[in-house]
Amino acid sequence: MKRLLLSLTVILLASQVFADIQDPPMRNQNSTRKLGRGWGNILYSFSEVFDTMQRVNELDGNAAAWSYGWVKGVRRWATRMGAGVYELATFPFPTNRRSYRPVLRSNIPWVNGGFEEFPPEFGFQSRKNYSTVYARY
């Protein structure tokens, strides 16, 4: 009886481990998503300029938005454009840490320093959240 109970316990624990393997955390990151991310970054990277200017305007005011915000937005536009070209050219291959992860650093730990996976949409057109929503500030 003890062997049967021990066997059932081991099988139950092993089935839980097997269930976790069936849905790995990076399953959504595949070559098709990388291709779409590349096209999106190329086509809509210009929206970084306006989005960054809006963020700087809310934090520091108009003068900062038209000076510092504009320069920071152009830099973010160029970075996103370069990442888009790179991801479009290498979409069939898992190049980032042997996976299809985004090349740009995530914005979750750094409030204003990182990038979202896809280019920003203008506020009145946004209908879809791609991932968990975090506060901007």
Image (cartoon, rainbow, N blue to C red):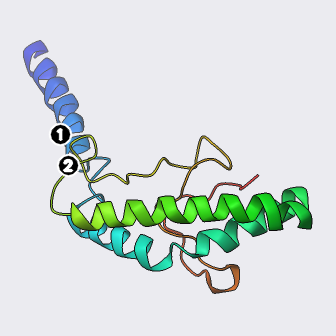
**Badge 2: few (under 14), some or many (20 or more) residues near its Cα, within 10 Å?**
few
Disc 2 to disc 1, C-alpha distance: 7 Å
Q: Nearer the viewer, residue 59 or 80?
A: 80
The residue lying at 67 percent from left, 58 percent from top is 72
Residue visible at 69% across and 74% down in the picture:
50
Q: Quadrant of residue 40?
A: bottom left
CB within 8 Å, label 2 to label 1: yes
Of 29 and 70, which appears nearest the observer? 70
Q: Residue furthest top?
A: 2
Quarter residue 16 falls in: top left
Question: Where in the figure is residue 23, as x and y percent of width and height?
Answer: 25, 50
How far from the left and from the top, in percent, is residue 88?
27, 68
* Helix, strand or loop at mark 2: loop
Query: Going by the image, does 136 lie left or right of 75?
Result: right
The residue wearing badge 2 is: 22
Residue 117, given in percent of the width and then of the height, sits at 46, 60
Q: Residues within 10 Å of mark 1 (few under 14, many from 20)?
A: few
Which residue is depicted at the point 58% across and 71% down?
120
Residue 82 is tagged as: none
* Left or right: where 128 falls relative to 16: right
| Amino acid type, mark 1 | Phe
Numbered circle sitting on residue 18: 1
Viewer-nearest residue: 100 or 132: 100
Residue shown at 54%/55% (left/top)?
Answer: 115
Disc 2 residue type (three-letter): Gln
Which quadrant of the rendered structure holds the N terminus?
Answer: top left
Left or right for 59, reference 15: right
Q: Secondary structure at mark 1?
A: helix
Give the image location of residue 29, x and y in percent: 29, 57
Look at the picture and state if 130 lies above or below 110.
Answer: below
Above or below residue 91? Residue 101 is: above
Q: Is residue 43 left or right of residue 91?
A: right
